[in-house]
Amino acid sequence: MLGLKFETKTSWAEIAKNNLQQILTDHAFAEQKAASNAVSIIINYSEETKLVTAMSEIAIEEMEHFKMVHDLMIARGMTLGREQRNDYAKTLQSFFTKTKDRNEALIQRLLVAALIEARSCERFKVFSENLEDPELIEFYKDLMVSEANHYTVFLGFARQYQDKDIVDKKWNALLDFEAEFIKKRGINATVHG
């Protein structure tokens, strides 16, 4: 369904499970960044009413997810802590040549966002399937569904702004690039690490 070309190994889930504070902190900040990205798209493409409506919903949902992760941390006696560097999104963004064409820039942003959501969905699935904690299993299963929905929204909008075959060619090339990059990861307790 997601089209990812490399599957996360269960060893990543073990690393994440053994560093729960770190994975939850990273996850919380990832939700904030996703909300910020949706807001940025609204600001930069405010004339696109359907896109603005969808991005508004995503921004709100992502901030709700942030709050859910933060509340979970508080309930477990954890504090959010400081954001840690994560080069996943920047690496994906580097795949595309910078452009001054607004439409092309939007498509690139939408494809990168779709891939981030798809990988998050896949990671949440792997994590939930390798946990023993019933609360966390349910938590990550629910978030997995939401991430899958976001993935389809971003990819669907990209296909509305350019010929589907052209978008799909870019999407497949980005998937290939991400697969090679993600193969070297899976060693840190971060959502995309």
Image (cartoon, grey):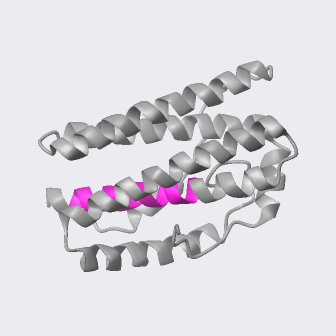
Residue sitting at x 29%, y 68% = 97
Residue 127 in picture, x, y percent from top left: 74, 52
Residue 187 image-quadrant placement? bottom right
Instruction: Examine the image and state in which quarter residue 4 appears.
Output: bottom right
Is residue 15 positioned above or below 46 on the image? below
Is 119 a magenta residue?
yes
Q: In the image, residue 148 lies at what x, y percent?
A: 51, 54
Q: Nearer the viewer, residue 68 or 81?
A: 68
The spot of residue 160 in percent (x, y) is 22, 63
Give yes or no for residue 65 being in the magenta stretch: no
The residue closer to the viewer here, 105 or 38, is: 38
Magenta-drawn segment: 104-120
Q: Residue at x 82, y 54 (%)?
A: 130
Left or right: where 167 falls relative to 181: left
Query: Is residue 23 in sight in this rendering?
Result: no
Q: Main secondary structure of the magenta part?
A: helix
Q: Quadrant of residue 170?
A: bottom left
Q: Which residue does the image show at 52% across and 49% down from the upper left?
A: 147
Residue 152 in percent (x, y) is at: 41, 58
For the image, the number of numbered tags is: 0
Left or right of residue 161: residue 5: right
Residue drawn at the location 49% of the way across and 78% of the way down = 176
Q: Above or below — where is 185 with respect to 42?
A: below
